[in-house]
Image: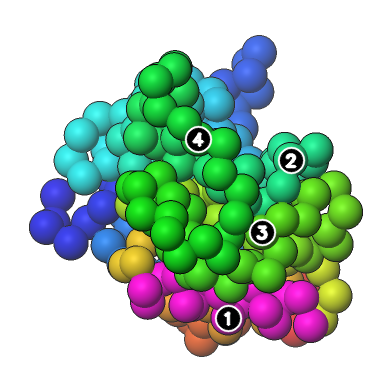
């Protein structure tokens, strides 16, 4: 594996009752890059994500993160290994504040879920005296995502776009090396979509995280990803740059049903 490779997927296969959803897929991701996986509905994108994040175990094949095999590990082990994931349907704690959501993730990452001797009931985002590692970490995540002004808001009262920002903050609080984003702009207005694109770029620059995204908005894909992987019927149809994918006849046939 090249030294700059963070993820190596080799001949990955997933069968469901005789149906092959992922068929010997192989690809690599370079550290600090943004790559997109695209394809029509039923192409196998979600299955691929579920295999990488541990929601599913592969029938066969290999998934290596920084050279270490992670295929078949449980999701919590994969999170600890350094992979974070957001879902198309936003996954947050709706009855908690934004700050409490992020704090919960930081506590989990610090391994303090069951530490009864450390106080964590801290809810003032503007408290300059907040100096514990927990408090500093939460402040840093709020600032990184730009949601300090939402810190005391109950998440269920936020717009869909703001809830997506909270989910991104939760993922970042786990300090992943690789972030999987599943339709990060789904259901967003044009303004919210623009903000999410800018946030992904900002986070990538500030943290050096590697991103793997699935996205139906091709403008978002072409704007963010230097490398695009096209899936169709469980296999990789093509891999390349924006220009290479746009000019690929096989991709146009699979995606649009036309050569034009």
- Asked if residue 203 lies in the magenta stretch, the reply is yes
Q: Which mark is residue 120?
A: 4
- Asked if residue 70 lies in the magenta stretch, the reply is no
Q: Say which quadrant the C terminus sits in.
A: bottom right
Mark 1 nearby-residue class (10 Å; few <14, some 14–19, many ≥20)? few
| Residue 244 vs residue 210, the one in the foreground | 210
Mark 2 nearby-residue class (10 Å; few <14, some 14–19, many ≥20)? some
Secondary structure beneath dot 3 equals loop
Colour scheme of the rendered structure:
rainbow
Q: Say which of marks 1 and 2 sits in front.
A: 2
Vertical arrangement, residue 170 with respect to residue 54, above or below: below
Instruction: Please give the residue where the numbered disc 2 appears in the rendered image.
Output: 96
Instruction: Please give the residue where the numbered disc 3 appears in the rendered image.
Output: 151
C-beta proximity under 8 Å, tags 4 and 1: no
N-terminal label among 4 and 3: 4
Give the residue drawn at x 48%, y 53%.
138
Q: In the figure, is residue 91 to the left or right of 128?
A: right
Mark 3 nearby-residue class (10 Å; few <14, some 14–19, many ≥20)? many
N-terminal label among 2 and 4: 2
Q: Give the range drawn in magenta.
A: 191-206
Residue 236 lies, in percent from the top left, at 50, 52
Q: Which mark is residue 198?
A: 1
Vertical arrangement, residue 30 with respect to residue 173, above or below: below
N-terminal label among 2 and 3: 2
N-terminal label among 4 and 1: 4
């Amino acid at each position: 594996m090249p030294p700059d490779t963070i993820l190596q997927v080799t001949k990955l296969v997933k069968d469901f009752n005789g149906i092959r959803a992922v068929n010997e897929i192989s690809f690599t991701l370079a550290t600090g890059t943004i790559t997109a996986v695209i394809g029509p509905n039923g192409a196998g994108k979600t299955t691929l994500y579920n295999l990488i994040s541990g929601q599913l175990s592969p029938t066969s094949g290999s998934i290596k993160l920084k050279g270490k095999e992670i295929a078949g590990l449980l999701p919590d082990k994969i999170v600890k290994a350094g992979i974070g994931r957001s879902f198309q349907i936003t996954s947050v704690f709706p009855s908690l504040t934004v700050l409490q959501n992020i704090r919960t993730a930081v506590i989990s990452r610090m391994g303090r879920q069951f530490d009864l001797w450390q106080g964590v009931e801290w809810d003032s985002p503007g408290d300059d005296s907040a100096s514990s590692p927990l408090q500093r970490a939460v402040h840093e995540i709020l600032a990184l995502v730009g949601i300090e002004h939402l810190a005391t808001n109950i998440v269920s009262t936020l717009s869909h776009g703001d809830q997506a920002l909270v989910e991104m903050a939760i993922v970042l609080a786990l300090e992943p090396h690789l972030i999987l984003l599943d339709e990060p702009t789904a259901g967003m207005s044009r303004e919210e979509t623009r903000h999410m694109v800018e946030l992904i770029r900002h986070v990538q620059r500030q943290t050096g995280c590697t991103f793997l995204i699935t996205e139906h908005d091709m403008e978002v894909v072409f704007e963010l990803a230097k490398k695009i992987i096209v899936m169709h019927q469980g296999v990789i149809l093509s891999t390349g740059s924006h220009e290479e994918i746009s000019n690929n006849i096989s991709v146009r046939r699979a995606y649009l049903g036309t050569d034009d």
